[in-house]
Image (cartoon, coloured by chain):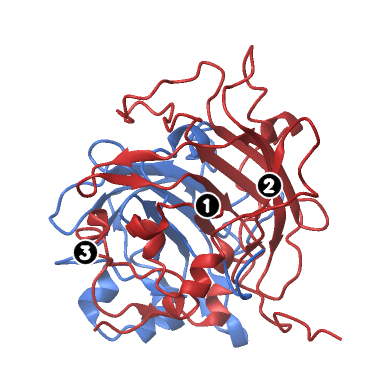
Amino acid sequence: MSGEPGPTPSQTIGPFFHDALLDTDLTELVSPDHPEAIRIAGAVYDGAGEPVPDAMVEIWQADAAGRYGSEEFSGFGRSGTDEHGRFSFTTLKPGPAQGPDGTLQAPHANVTVFARGLLRRVITRVYFPGEEANAEDPLLASIEDRALRETLFARDEGDGSYRFEVRLQGEGQTAFFDV
Amino acid sequence: MAHQTAGEAAGHPPYLYPDYEGTRLRAPEGTLVILPRALSDVAGPAHGRGPVWEADADLTRQHEGEPLGERIIITGRVLDGGGRPVRGGLVEVWQANAAGRYTHQRDQHPAPLDPNFSGAGRCLTDDEGRYRFVTVKPGAYPWKNHDNAWRPAHVHFSVFGSSFRSRLITQMYFPGDPLFEHDPIFQSVRDPRARQRLISAFDLETTEPEWALGYRFDIVLEGSEATPFERPHA
């Protein structure tokens, strides 16, 4: 290999990934018949407020007990977006997960979005309204801008349905993380 | 000048690179929220999907006949930020055919489709972090980013590592491509040394006589940088 050591740089997913990455349905982390199944659905929008129809959204989350990558529940999901920018997952509500230094993180799912025009993925989290642990969550607490913090919360639409919008740019831009 | 993100400092492209037109309305603006390492460098999905078969790594044997084009082998290792091999990590690839055409329905480039080539493959890394694909060399193709815009030949890679931070999607290029200097996606990686890490190396050892040319492409992921990246040479 040429070049000095260091991480391999990211490049855009481009527009032609569907056959390779979305040939298997990975939107159902549990069966919709699961008694505790919830649905997280939403859409991805660009800086003009237009839907992004060629994005890929991945989630990575703990199970109801706050454990990542258990035998019964992989915690990983992947969804394309349709012509209206929409994606959806059928999953379980994650439990509070152990954070560093014994802190407790409020229930959340890690969200990654890839798209044509994104040279690198964007990373965010979806949190759930009304959780007691939200008040103690170290990451939420680190975001002083209240409106920015609010972008991390899904809207509870009842019946186990949550809505989560991803705004890549402009007014209401989602809180994205620098890792 | 916007604040440089940790990703840019590591050699990743910025979100906004106006020469690549697609970034203009999709790049996040302003400062990102710092996600402390302790929260991001946690075990991540190493394996995002169901069974992976050995045959999935040979893109020349997915149809009745053999695809047209220059048969090649692409192999390399997937390493984490500490230089350790990623074992059992999922590597997914997709690419245009030898004429520069994707099977994707939205690809309108008037170059021929190849009935014997779909251009998608996957495999799992072995205990040394090694992966290996057999395919044909993809062709360059035009796109509408600017006047007379052409993408250098490339293979898309999607890789999982040991940490949530490791997740990477990138593109592998071929050495000496004259289109490099004209391609804003390649040029979006601002550090020329980092750019070199996107280019595979021709490898005579990987090359199989009378059969296929070999290219090496090692992938270094972020995350788990607990040990020094490179041990000093004796």
Q: Is residue B2 above or below residue A170?
A: below
Label 3: element kind: loop
Q: Which chain is red?
A: B
Q: Position of residue A119 (x, y in %)?
A: 37, 60
User: Which numbered disc, 2 or 3, marks the residue that appears first in the sequence?
Assistant: 2
Image quadrant in which the C terminus of chain B is located: bottom right
Residue plotted at (26% across, 71% down): A150
Q: What colour has chain A?
A: blue
Q: Position of residue B226 (x, y in %)?
A: 70, 82
Q: Chain of mark 2?
A: A
> In the image, what residue type sits under mark 2?
Glu
Furthest-right residue in this view: B234
> In the image, what residue type sits under mark 1?
Tyr
- Number of residues whose C-alpha sits closer than 10 Å to that of mark 2, classed few (under 14), some (14–19) or many (20 or more): few
Q: Is residue B195 above or below residue A137?
A: above
Residue plotted at (36% across, 41% down): A15
Horizontal side of B141 relative to A33 (left or right) equals: left
**Marker disc for residue B25:** none
Q: Mark 1 = which residue?
A: B173
Q: Chain of mark 1?
A: B
Q: Mark 2 = which residue?
A: A72
Residues tagged by mark 1 and mark 2 found on one chain of the structure: no
